[in-house]
Image (cartoon, rainbow, N blue to C red):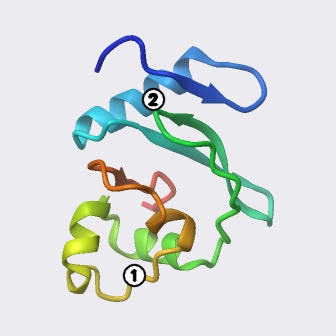
Amino acid sequence: MAEDHACVVRGKCNHHTELCIRALAELVESPGGALWLRRGGDGFVPAAELNMALATSVEPLDGGLAEFMNRTGWVIDLDEFRARPEAYLGFDAPEWLVSIPPRGWSCRCPTRKR
């Protein structure tokens, strides 16, 4: 990825946060990504984004995205999901996720229990 990409971090900017997002994005050949962190019992909140609009949503701990990703451990290819939703049986995509413009985005869950 080019070095001119913008990483927006809420609170204190952390170079390691940007490196983590870049590394995961490159693994799945995505132009960017976001880091979501669990905040108490409220759910997952966006902590940093790379090459995408700032998200304002809170993803519930028991929401469709968290449930699907914890159950499957899958990387969600949004372009594939749009073209073949039947491949993601049982996935109830939140509106903020499906509203991301098609660009080769993928979503990976770092919270899967081992």
Q: Residue at x 27, y 32 (%)?
A: 26
Q: Is residue 66 above or below residue 22?
A: below
Of tags 1 and 2, which is closer to the observer?
Answer: 1
**Mark 2 element type:** helix
Q: Residue at x 30, y 48 (%)?
A: 103
Residue 2 placed where, x, y %? 31, 15
Q: Residue at x 80, y 58 (%)?
A: 40
Alpha-carbon neighbours of circle 1 within 10 Å: few (<14), some, or many (≥20)? some
Horizontal placement of 57 versus 70: left or right? Answer: right
Mark 1 / mark 2, whichever is N-terminal: 2
Q: Which residue is mark 2?
A: 20
**Mark 1 element type:** loop
Identity, as a three-letter code, of the amino acid under mark 2: Cys
Tell me where residue 5 sits by quadrant.
top left
Residues 44 and 1: in front is 1
Identity, as a three-letter code, of the amino acid under mark 1: Phe
For the residues marked 1 and 2, what is the alpha-carbon distance in whole angstroms? 26 Å
Residue 91: assigned label? 1
Horizontal placement of 91 versus 60: left or right? Answer: left
Alpha-carbon neighbours of circle 2 within 10 Å: few (<14), some, or many (≥20)? some
